[in-house]
Image (cartoon, rainbow, N blue to C red):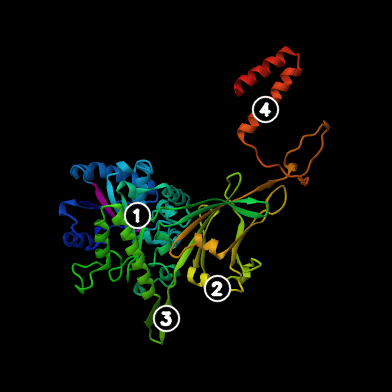
Amino acid sequence: MVVIFVHGWSVRNLNTYGQLPTRLREGAARLGVQLKIRNLLLSQYISFDDAVTLDDIARTFQQAVVESVLPALEPGERFACITHSTGGPVVRKWLDLFYGSDGLAHCPMSHLVMLAPANHGSALAQLGKSRLSRIKFLFEGGEPGERVLNWLELGSGEQWELNLHALDYRSVDYGLFPFVLTGQRIDRSVYDHLNSYTGEAGSDGVVRACAANMNFTYICLEQEGDALVLKRKARAPRMAFGILPGRSHSGERMGIIRSVGAVDADPAQPHPTVEWVLKCLAVTDGVGYQQMCDQLDTLTAETQDAERFEDVQKLIGNTRYVTDRYSMFTFKLKDDRDQALQDYDLLLTAGPNYDENELPDGFFQDRQRNSVNPGKLTYYVDHDLMHKGLSTEAMGQKIGFRVVARPASGLAYYQKAELRSDVSQIEELLRPNETTLVEITLDRSVDLGVFRLTTNLEAAEFGASPLGQLLPPGVSEEEVREQRLQLLLDRLEKTQDQAERAMIRAELARLL
């Protein structure tokens, strides 16, 4: 088996892989996975140049595969990829560009093991483009890699598109086995006190568990009157996902890769990353893959139960950190003209009256709007607190959200829209350790006063006063064409002017 290691954002040294490649090679024999030293390849791609995009990296990855990997494969052999952080989206983008959902049967990759991948982005990406970050990189002789960070920002357009494409992937049917392994421990020794995201519960200090997980749901809601109506719901194919015990994103002490040593401190307890990556690489068929999914589900439950409380001794007293299970909503808000909403409030509501003031205390953890596209908004919530608070009899099992977009009046505006649901319906969509993509389309109300015709030929000023009459719902291009054809036929029948008849016939020929 040929194995390619693909690192994450901002890496400049191959030491980022630590001892993991060597440990996998040495430990593979006991699971029957044949890894030879000549078949271990370490990537070294550039992500710290502001001009480079994720698409650029994925396309040059293809060239590297063609030049260095495919010639090394034996007949019928395929390669495996082990990625860290941004490396996961890089390989997923490569897969989408060069094979897509229709070409998976021809893909030369058999296994994709993603370690702490930012599949739904990272809250830190927005901060990585800050002035302080840029100064840091300038002193080091580089740039932050702004185009890659744009992709990694929560709710980015390219990220959204790639994830929607994943809804159509049935990779296991073609012998391509994807896995996500991540952690949820915070390495307090590298916690940045100026940036709370590095200590965020439910994350590994960089990537939230629910943002790594590729088991996600997509729903599409459209406005009808003052209600938001479900138009489409889709669920991504099941992907193996596991939370490894005691792992953070990076660092030599707890990092999911860097903490792998030359040997295990306790031979009776092998390093979880080495153990589970080898188990993933040992999967050879669909039955084995589903069994691995089940095993990782069990591991995740055990890890989250064991790591729910963390007591840290400090100079004065003891601090207890609580880690519940968390979920994300990533919203895409636009109007029926496909324009991103710029100015709006999105309010979560609960209780029998769907009141934003009745939500359980402490359930809401974070809100971040995408800096490139303000129409993208991500909410991070404590799933366990929300479930407990909403399930009480007094709350009536009711939950929803309300969109108030601006302008709310005038010549062109938006009307308030609201989704009202019950807890059981929402829990179908918002699951622990998962992300839900929510696309919301509001109607753009346009007053007929925007464009008027008059028979008054005298010079006169006109103002911007609404008429109070709205433009009717839009018609399709085909309907407009049919209306135009009928008008032309009516005019042709009524006119006797030969020049006009010739112009009408010419227009009819163009439309037909």
Q: What stretch is highlighted in magenta?
A: 78-88
Q: Residue at x 70, y 21 (%)?
A: 489
Mark 2 vs mark 3, CA separation in Å: 22 Å
- Residue 397's label in the rendered image is none
> Which secondary structure lies at badge 4?
helix
Give the SS element for disc 1: helix
Disc 1 target residue: 88
As shown in the figure, which amino acid type bears the numbered disc 2?
Answer: Gly
Is 377 above or below relative to 320?
above
Is residue 103 covered in magenta? Answer: no
Q: Is mark 3 on a helix, strand or loop?
A: strand
Tell me if residue 253 can be seen.
yes
> Residue at label 2?
389
Q: What element carries label 2?
A: helix
The first of marks 2 and 4 along the sequence is 2
| Front: mark 2 or 4 | 2
Residue 85, magenta (yes or no): yes
* Residue ID for mark 3: 320
Q: What residue type is labelled 1?
A: Gly
